[in-house]
Image: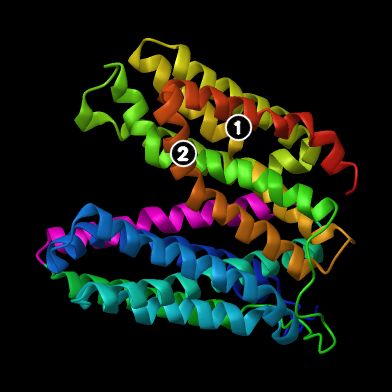
Amino acid sequence: MNPTRKVNNPMTLLANSPRVATRLAFLVAGFSIACWAPMVPFAKERLNVDEAVLGILLLCLGLGSVVAMLAAGPITSRTGTKPIVVIGGLGVAVLLPVLAIANTPLTLGVALALFGGFLGILEVAMNIHAVEVEKLDSVPLMSGFHAHFSIGGFFGASVMTLAMTLGASLLASALIGTALMIVATVLAASRMLETRAQDDAPLFVTPHGFVVLLASLAVIMFLIEGAILDWGALLLTLEGRVPPEQGGLGYMMFAIAMTAGRLIGDRVTAKFGDFSVLFVGGLVAVAGIAVVLASPFYLGAMAGFVLIGLGSSNVAPVFFRLAGAQKAMPANLAITAVTSMGYAGILIGPAAVGFVANHIGLPNAFWFLAALLFVIPMLAKTVTARS
């Protein structure tokens, strides 16, 4: 790994820091997906489709992401991370307005698959670059980088909502988002590390051993996040703790707590280590699910969602760091495995929760999730012993 040039002036170093580039990449990723979210109701109305067709269209985005993620690792090994981050960032930026005007299910499905594909390669490449920057600086940085994904999501939703509230059309609002993402991607490109391309890097290595364990734990962690996103509101309203219009407060508290936890996560990890983050964080998240399920009161349930967010906030960043440090397979491909399997957890997990809930009820399905999440603190010593 070699930066593009050496600088000695501290202010110049700060301005050209690869840390800044990585934060910008994470911001673009979070911003892009958050810009799409407010478009979903408009797309449904424009295409005049029912929920079943809309669900298939949304699945196109997820499938496009997973397929692209599987290809991103080997490609990044050959090209370095910088060109893939740039292609991914510019790709989602250019496709965002297309999502605002696609007027048939076919065109929107293709656009979503491509949008998901560019987002997928961006997410893999930015995590690989984040691991490289962390190794170069020899301090924990992953939690802070992942916090910027959440911050980007907040700004993306805010920009789209504000623009449309002020009277801008859906297309005009999307174009504003496009312009901001292009600027951020260009700024990131000028500050990224110039990593060495490996011409002899394998195009595919079957994940094995330690990497399979990491990826499996990542599936659990992302499955929890997807379940809170898709089922948290229903869980809150099911027993009348909050009215339906306030059901989203649970996820809001979860997201705020997760972002706050990640903003301080690097300092916590540096002081206490990866094992403590996985062990204590996993137990706190499990306790949070138990509090949500056991508390009959509104404030108790809200406190539970805060605990889930705080406890889980720095678990995934540790997994990415460990994937980059292991020696069982090339780091790029290991990070690809963790990213793609984790994303599959978000994609498939909520449907699995629905299937289980249909048989045993939603509260019992969440008790099952708590038991599954308990695996992470129980294996914390095993996975961190390798680092």
Question: Viewer-nearest of labels 2 and 1?
Answer: 2
Q: From the viewer's perspective, is 322 left or right of 55?
A: right
Height in image: 90 above or below 284? below
Q: Is residue 153 magenta?
A: yes
Q: Can you tell which mark lies on residue 227? A: 2
Density class for disc 2 (Cα within 10 Å; few <14, some 14-19, many ≥20) is many
Residue corresponding to mark 1: 311
Q: Main secondary structure of the magenta part?
A: helix
Magenta segment boundaries in residue numbering: 139-167
Residue at 68%, 57% (x, y): give it: 338
Residue 350 coordinates in the image, percent (x, y): 45, 43
Name the residue type under label 1. Gly
Rendering coords of residue 209 (x, y %): 85, 53
In the rendered image, the residue lying farthest to the left is 167
* Residue 382 in sight: yes
196, 114: nearer the viewer: 114
Q: Is residue 102 left or right of residue 264?
A: left
Q: What residue type is labelled 2?
A: Ala
Residue 380: horizontal and vertical position, in percent?
Answer: 79, 35
The residue lying at 64 percent from left, 81 percent from top is 82
> As displayed, is residue 242 above or below residue 182?
above
Work out which residue is located at the far bottom of the displayed protein and give it: 199
Is residue 260 among what the camera can see? Answer: no
